Amino acid sequence: MNKRDYYEVLNVPKNADINEIKTSYRKLAMQYHPDRNPGDSTAEEKFKEAAEAYEVLGDPDKRSRYDRYGHQGLRGTDFHGYSSVDDIFSAFGDIFGGGGSIFDSFFGGGRSSHSRKHTADNRGSDLKIKLTLTLEEIATGVEKTVKIKKWVSCETCNGTGAKEGSGMQNCATCGGQGEIRQVSRSVFGQFVNITVCPECNGSGKVIKNPCNVCSGEGRVMSEEKIQINVPAGVEEGNYIPLRGKGNQGKRGGSTGDLIVIISEKEHKDFKRQGNNVFHHTTISFIDAVLGAEIEVPTLFGPNKIYVDPGSQPGTTIVMKDKGIPYLNSSAKGDQIVFLNIFVPASVSQKEKLMLKELAESENFNPMKKSPSKSKDFFEKVKDAFF
């Protein structure tokens, strides 16, 4: 089924600013929130659709890609395409979890039942690393192996946090409920504020005898090698999410994600602009006059190009399909070569005589080649200043 236009989903114009987008998403999310529509599959789908649209239009980079290329432009980016409501609560934990959340006014500053599940799950935190790549690696795609320090499951207690033979017991603070209810009264009536139990972190259970190795955490710090497959065509600021490769959660909690942020290493021979690359090469005066076949570097190895006779400084030569590939596409950008003319800093006496002889030739003297134009120019200068 074709996806609806994201601006249509959020009911905002294409020139809407981020505040309009956030306000509209907040309204829709409140309207179709699962806590307001229990068992309503249609409302759940609309809730997921709104979250997907907000993820794109609320991010400047993704919105720019979407505006230019539509849904196809999001291929290859860190795009969830939510399959469940829990995915949304995981991705927008900062939005749904209070602390200035745009949902605070509706949920009374507390967390929904979904966010409590995630708290009780003790999900590990995400990790972010920067991966610096050369333009050659970006042009061809590359597999990298990196070492990272992170929390991993404790092998001694199998991630439970408890000594062998020891178990869990109900939390005395919340009576095993995982949450604490506080009733308050005002002129508007009675309100019940539900918060996650700080003692058991929402699980309702506490450890009797903690593991000696992890001190009850259920995890230890370790170093791990991780392979990262980078597709051709990425660019500075793109990021690759590796699900489940982040920190292990406490006491059997789920694992966070590893977010790999792409960085481009400055190249000595090339300058990137979009999917095109630019290269400056210097040729001799003789080659510029007579024409020549020369070799230039490309991101895929050396290549030969032909310089036309009479080429001027700044002449450009386009090498088709020698640039950066488009992400998830067989198409490539171009390499544009700028010609510089080499002028020697010093010459021998013999070379001086040869050059002076050439200078007498009308073909090598711009003043003799176009005297009328030169006269016109100097006449204009004279008129302007005298």
Image (cartoon, rainbow, N blue to C red):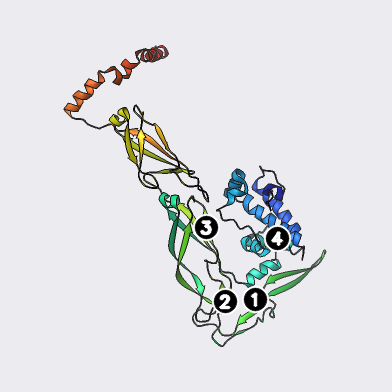
- Residue 351: where, in percent of width, then height? 20, 27
Q: Which residue is mark 3?
A: 240
* Label 3 vs label 2, nearer the camera: 3
Determine which residue is flagged by label 1: 203
Amino acid of disc 4: Asp
Discs 4/3, front: 3
Q: Which residue is mark 2?
A: 251
Q: Which of pointers 4 and 1 indicates the residue nearer the eye? A: 1
Tell me, yes or no, whether the two marked residues, 1 and 2, touch with CB atoms within 8 Å. yes
**Residue 50: x, y in percent?**
69, 54
Identity of the residue drawn at 47% across and 52% down: 232
Lower position in the chain sequence, tag 1 or tag 2 = 1
Crowdedness of circle 4 by 10 Å Cα count: few (<14), some, many (20+)? some
To which residue does mark 4 refer? 104
Determine the CA span between mark 3 and mark 2.
27 Å
Mark 1 to mark 2: distance in Å?
10 Å
Q: Position of residue 299 (x, y in %)?
A: 40, 47
Query: What secondary structure is marked by label 4?
Result: helix
